[in-house]
Image (cartoon, coloured by chain):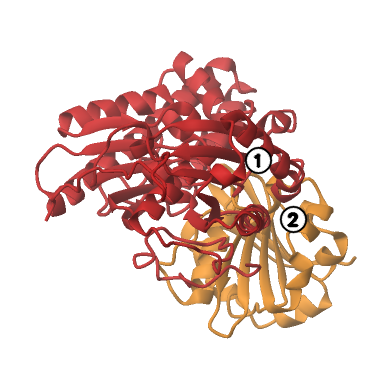
């Protein structure tokens, strides 16, 4: 039942002269990213334009709708990426783009550009689910065989996935409200810290006492592997207001202690849920050591990472974290996911697939709300 | 624009808010604009989640935060949709047009968080729901709207 699939990547393109090579485009949210990846796991070029730097001065408010930014920069970014890879479109075997989930404007820009490029160069277009990109990244950077357990936690997502093969994903849990990264951002905002909130809260937390304030442990001990972080943010706000009314202001030590308590609560919630997911995963795959992969921007938090390393050791799982530059949104993960899909189905061409703002990775588990139905503007 | 207070509900717990949202679900429909305003952690998303679940008639439906994606859409059985949106990350009204709000106004029930970025004409006929916390532990929710909303919500027991 839990037979590991041999991890064989076909090394060559159709005429056998060089490794299969895929161009990947990611435009599902704030980043415009393009990369070229080969079947022998080399990232030939990898470029990201992020709007985060511009956002910092606005305290996290995006000054531009991502779509406009993507339109103005994507063509140029593709040309620059190909140049850095020292390739032309003739050397590319397929064009992959994030097709969902995400913000519809950005998705449409990426998908249309990819389709135009594919059509003009006579190559197939591959529609990639953004979450699948994150899910398969560990196989690009490390030799990880199926099945494995993935914790994907970022500003927009917080999911536990059982990854059993290309296209074979089972969602074990998801956030029922805010994503973990979003909770960090909102907590930072509430406490008047900078943007992005993750590093700001982590810096403050390092100076604070995590036990001065008592925060709820969302869903702790509850069955299933879902997450909930919205209540934490509300509790932080309430405690901060109490501090202000008692001491006249929110002092530096209050802020540090609140951040420390918040971070500790997130760590406890994540480890509690991952532990349950390991048990669930093992009920299908047996007691062997399997990879526990962590992906997404929240993996940058040292306390979270340390807690998960410890948990993996205790649970006899093998801990992997994608390199930081591939944890946030990027084109390499999209190119790689496209490449893996192409290897499974060599005749693959998704030219008839449109942008899908709502696209759960595991459609069966998420069929409760209109799964399979295209987003309003798609 | 005359937006008179229709009703204000005070001393609310989360359970009370959920019950009020379920009540409101019987009075809103596609074509309506419902604005949810108030600071972070005041209960806007909790209220929106309860309202959406009541409209979908599915108490366990996934209703993730729309902050990151800006829009989360929910198809209803009659072919219309709910758009749960968070305009926090937008810079102003022109972004709202870019997102295509004006193309789907008639067929969509809009639940809008951080509505100050919304074009004024879209706010004029909206039902405004304001969330506040007089003390850290309880919530006040007040409903404001034009004469049409006053009339429509006449029979609703929102408090």
A49 left or right, relative to A351? right
Q: Residues within 10 Å of mark 2 (few under 14, many from 20)?
A: many
User: Disc 2 is attached to a residue of which chain?
Assistant: B
Residue labelled with disc 1: A78
Q: Residue furthest top?
A: A207
Same chain letter for marks 2 and 1: no
Q: Which chain is red?
A: A
Q: Does residue A321 lie above or below B44 as drawn?
A: above
Q: Return the x and y of residue A290 as percentages of the image width and height.
A: 19, 39
Q: Quadrant of residue B35?
A: bottom right
Q: Return the x and y of residue A303 as percentages of the image width and height.
A: 38, 24
Q: Quadrant of residue B4?
A: bottom right
Pair 2/1: label in front? 1
Asked whether A71 or A31 is in front, the reply is A71
Q: Which chain is orange?
A: B
User: Disc 1 is attached to a residue of which chain?
Assistant: A
Q: Which mark is residue B115?
A: 2
C-alpha span from label 2 to label 1: 36 Å
Which quarter of the rendering shows the N terminus of chain A? bottom left
- Residue at 19% over, 34% down: A317
Q: Return the x and y of residue A141 as percentages of the image width and height.
A: 37, 32
Asked whether A263 or B104 is in front, the reply is B104
- Residue at 81% over, 49% down: B92
């Amino acid at each position: 039942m839990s037979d590991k699939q041999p991890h064989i990547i076909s090394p060559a393109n159709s005429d056998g002269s060089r490794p299969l090579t895929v161009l990947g485009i990611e435009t599902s949210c704030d980043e415009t990213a393009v990369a070229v990846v080969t079947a022998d796991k080399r990232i030939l070029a990898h470029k990201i334009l992020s709007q985060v730097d511009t956002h910092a001065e606005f305290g996290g408010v995006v000054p531009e709708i991502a779509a406009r930014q993507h339109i103005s920069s994507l063509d140029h970014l593709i040309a620059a990426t190909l140049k850095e890879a020292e390739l032309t479109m003739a050397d590319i075997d397929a064009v992959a783009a994030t097709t969902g989930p995400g913000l519809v404007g950005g998705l449409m820009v990426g998908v249309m550009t990819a389709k135009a490029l594919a059509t003009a160069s006579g190559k197939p277009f591959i529609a990639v689910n953004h979450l699948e990109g994150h899910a398969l990244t560990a196989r690009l950077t490390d030799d990880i065989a199926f099945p494995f357990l993935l914790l994907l936690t970022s500003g927009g997502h917080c999911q536990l996935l059982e990854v059993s093969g290309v296209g074979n994903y089972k969602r074990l849990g998801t956030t029922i409200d805010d994503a973990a990264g979003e909770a960090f951002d909102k907590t930072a905002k509430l406490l008047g810290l900078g943007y992005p909130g993750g590093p700001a809260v982590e810096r403050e937390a390092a100076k604070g006492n995590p036990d001065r304030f008592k925060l709820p442990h969302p869903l702790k001990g509850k069955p299933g592997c879902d997450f909930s972080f919205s209540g934490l943010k509300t509790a932080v706000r309430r405690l901060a207001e109490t501090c202000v009314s008692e001491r006249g202001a929110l002092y530096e030590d209050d802020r540090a202690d609140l951040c420390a308590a918040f971070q500790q609560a997130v760590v406890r919630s994540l480890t509690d849920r991952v532990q349950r997911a390991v048990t669930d995963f093992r009920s299908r795959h047996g007691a062997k050591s399997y990879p526990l992969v962590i992906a997404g921007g929240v993996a940058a938090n040292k306390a979270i990472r340390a807690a998960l390393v410890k948990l993996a050791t205790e649970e006899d799982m093998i801990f992997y974290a994608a390199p930081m530059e591939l944890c946030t949104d990027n084109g390499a993960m999209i190119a790689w996911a496209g490449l893996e899909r192409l290897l499974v189905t060599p005749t693959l061409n998704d030219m008839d697939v449109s942008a899908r703002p709502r696209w759960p990775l595991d459609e069966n588990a998420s069929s409760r709300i209109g799964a399979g139905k295209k987003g309003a503007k798609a | 624009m005359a937006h008179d207070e229709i009703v204000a509900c005070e001393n609310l717990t989360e359970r009370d808010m959920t019950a009020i949202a379920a009540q409101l679900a019987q009075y809103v429909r596609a074509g309506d604009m419902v604005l949810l305003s108030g600071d972070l952690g005041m209960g806007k998303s909790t209220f929106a989640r309860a309202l959406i679940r009541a409209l979908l008639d599915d108490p366990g439906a996934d209703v993730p935060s729309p902050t990151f994606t800006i829009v989360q859409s929910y198809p209803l059985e009659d072919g219309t949709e709910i758009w749960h949106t968070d305009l926090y990350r937008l810079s102003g009204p022109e972004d709202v047009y870019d997102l295509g709000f004006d193309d789907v106004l008639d067929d969509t029930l809009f639940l809008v968080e951080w509505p100050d970025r919304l074009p004024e004409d879209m706010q004029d006929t909206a039902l405004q729901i304001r969330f506040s916390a007089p003390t850290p532990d309880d919530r006040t929710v007040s409903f404001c709207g034009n004469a049409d909303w006053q009339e429509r919500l006449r029979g609703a027991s929102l408090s």
